[in-house]
Amino acid sequence: MGLSHLAIAGHIAGPLNVAVCEANRLIRFIYNRLNVRTYPSVVDALASDKGITGVIIATPTSSHYTISKIFLEQSIPCFIEKPLTLMVNRSKELMDLATSGNVYTQMGFVLRYVSTFSRLRDLVRTGPLGAVHSYRARMTGKVITSPDTKSWRTDFSAGGGCLNEYGPHLIDLCRFIFGDVSTLQSAEKSHVHSARADDQIAFNWIHSSGVAGDVKLDWCDTTKRKSVIQFEVNFEHACVKGDNSALHFDFRGNNSLTPEQQSQIAEPLTPPKVSFYLRGEEYTLQLEDFIGHCTGHNYRVDHEFGLENAAKLCDGLEVDLLIESISKKAGLK
């Protein structure tokens, strides 16, 4: 993630306005050859550069707390990759620090900027399809394909496992679309290759609105080339199925919508415009927002899409609280 964030940030803010903190001397040498400024540590960066206006933290989760705290104490805006930390009390401390210092923060919940999921949220909030009764959410991918006892990725206590890696994205997306979760009803884990972490996890919960959610995560699905997120939402007037690329509408026979209204609701989405495309529009959109807040400039090419979609540290804390509850109920803690 750090590599793609660097490429996007360099385009948005300008390559001379971006620097990298990297402990590995060889990697710093390579960056320097590419005319990218580097520092061996966060301490060196703060000592050498008095003009830091924002920081992107894309390190392993176990280091998020220490690095974020250093910059937040200096009132420097932080973009923090998911999840926030591995301990709820530390996540709360960071949020309180940002709040008391009035420091802008943003979480790397990039799926909020995917046009299909943003549109699904609008359908839930504005209600053209009636009330939502229930939904199914799935996130599957091919990440762990063989036993691994050395990597932190397969150690739950170090931030690995499907719940820690896939979970934050889908958990936040469910909150983003359907609102806060009030009750966790059940949670079960499964192991495929990892003995120290979960490879598959399923849970059921109820949102504050009364909507019931059935959620499953699986990062050992060999049929997938990369992660796929799928929703099936039961509205009063239609069943809506969607993934990263499209929404499909199955209108119920007794719905009260006119053919014109149905056609308008089901109209194909146009992807938002961005100044620099890498991996997907959503990756650029989130950094256009973050860097714009840091510098006071508007870097948006699309001035209408997802202007309020950015996730804050309070969202990161809520996700960490839910991960804590799910892990306890599933027997991971």
Image (spheres, grey):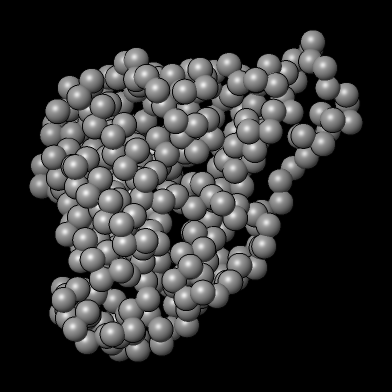
Residue 200, quarter of the rendered image: top left
Q: Nearer the viewer, residue 308 or 177?
A: 308
Position of the N terminus, as image quadrant, is: bottom left
Relative to 16, say whether 110 is above or below: above
Q: Nearer the viewer, residue 175 or 186?
A: 175
Q: Position of residue 80 (x, y in %)?
A: 33, 57
Determine the residue positioned at 30% across, 51% down. Answer: 95
Furthest residue in direction front, as rendered: 100
Q: Nearer the viewer, residue 116 or 57?
A: 57
Determine the residue positioned at 44% across, 30% down. Answer: 180
Q: Nearer the viewer, residue 194 or 158?
A: 158
Q: Position of residue 104 (x, y in %)?
A: 40, 62
Determine the residue positioned at 36% across, 50% down. Answer: 313
Position of the C terminus, as image quadrant, is: top left
Furthest residue in direction top, as rendered: 254
Q: Position of residue 93 (x, y in %)?
A: 22, 49
- In the rendered picture of this protein, how many numbered marks are placed on residues? 0
Determine the residue positioned at 32% across, 70% down. Answer: 76
Relative to 134, say whether 23 is above or below: below
Q: Is residue 270 left or right of residue 79?
A: right
Q: Position of residue 81 (x, y in %)?
A: 34, 55
Residue 142 appears in view? no
Q: Is residue 254 left or right of residue 238?
A: right
Q: Is residue 179 left or right of residue 50?
A: right
Residue 324 appears in view? yes
